[in-house]
Amino acid sequence: MRINVSNSGLEFSRIVQGMMRLKQWDFSTKEAENFLLKAIDLGVTTFDHADIYGNYTCESLFGEVLKINPSLRNKIQIVTKTGIILPDKEKKRIHYYDTTKSHILESVDRSLNNLHTDHIDLLLIHRPDPLMDPTEIVEAFLELYKQGKVLYFGVSNFTMQQFNTLQSKFSLSLVTNQIELSPYNLDHIQNDNTYFLLEKNINPMIWSPLAGGKIFDASNEKSVKILSALKEVSSEMNVVEIDTVIYAWLLNHPMGAIPISGSGKIERLKNAVNALNIKMPRELWFKIYEAALGHDVP
């Protein structure tokens, strides 16, 4: 299943494969290629990166696959992010943000080189920067767009006001806000960001839909309550895998979420894909929601 992201013309697979842990998976280039091919066979053609993932290594590891099999590039969409600086022993002493025009341009050129591609499908500002100059960011975006290096732009982890401020300076549309959302973390429902996205017809990308595994933590009282509700819904809907239920819960929200699967196991990606055709009854959706809240709705 594919989605026209925010009616922008940018087409993604409805489930995205996250590549943040590519280095941790310790794939050979051939193993990584096989993983991509299996994902594509499942209909998952969109891959989520950031320049800093794997301490600046994951883009290069992914790029080695495209180097040995260039034909894959026309079958996939690449998302990457910029704006976070990680400390190193020689130059950068601390972890901080840099959304200056010069850094954005340099970062994109480095990503293009690492990924062995001539364009990025979607570039995101990774985190809101307290020193963010929207005019300067837009100058970088427009230069990259005119050069054909980036086709679409968006943000990640932005509030409504931060999104609106950047959009107010930009003649093109920001096509997504990549946010954290799961039954464990309801922040963007409770702070009204999801209502803002609905108002603007923006499809959010969802990171950490399984809360980084926290939902399965038996030592956490909140997790135990949520998992109990998930198991009840799983049984009632005759859905075997709990993570499939979680993805279905996200996909059944009217905002048109685009969840990111972060696992290097193709079976886990299949579980996410299997959620695409599940219609979750409203009552069962609320069973999970109320377990996440810790109380019944008023």
Image: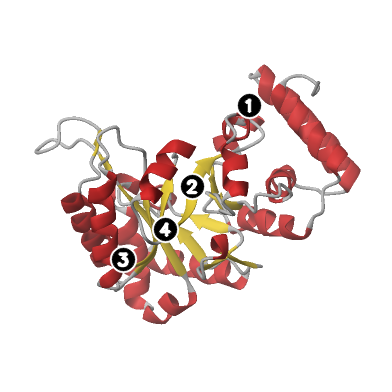
Amino acid at the residue labelled 4: Phe
Which of the two marks, 2 or 3, is nearer to us in this view? 2
Amino acid at the residue labelled 1: Asp
In this rendering, position of residue 112 left or right of residue 9: left
Looking at the image, tell me whether mark 2 or mark 4 is earlier in sequence order: 4
Q: CA distance from mark 2 to mark 1?
A: 25 Å
Residue 207, disc: none
Q: CA distance from mark 2 to mark 3?
A: 21 Å
Circle 3 residue:
115
Q: Position of residue 197 (x, y in %)?
A: 57, 46
Circle 4 residue:
27
Circle 1 residue:
217
Task: Assign a secondary structure to mark 1.
Answer: loop
Is residue 209 visible in the rendered image? The answer is no
- Residue found at x 49% / y 53%: 176
Looking at the image, tell me whether mark 2 or mark 1 is earlier in sequence order: 2
Amino acid at the residue labelled 3: Leu
- Residue found at x 87% / y 38%: 283
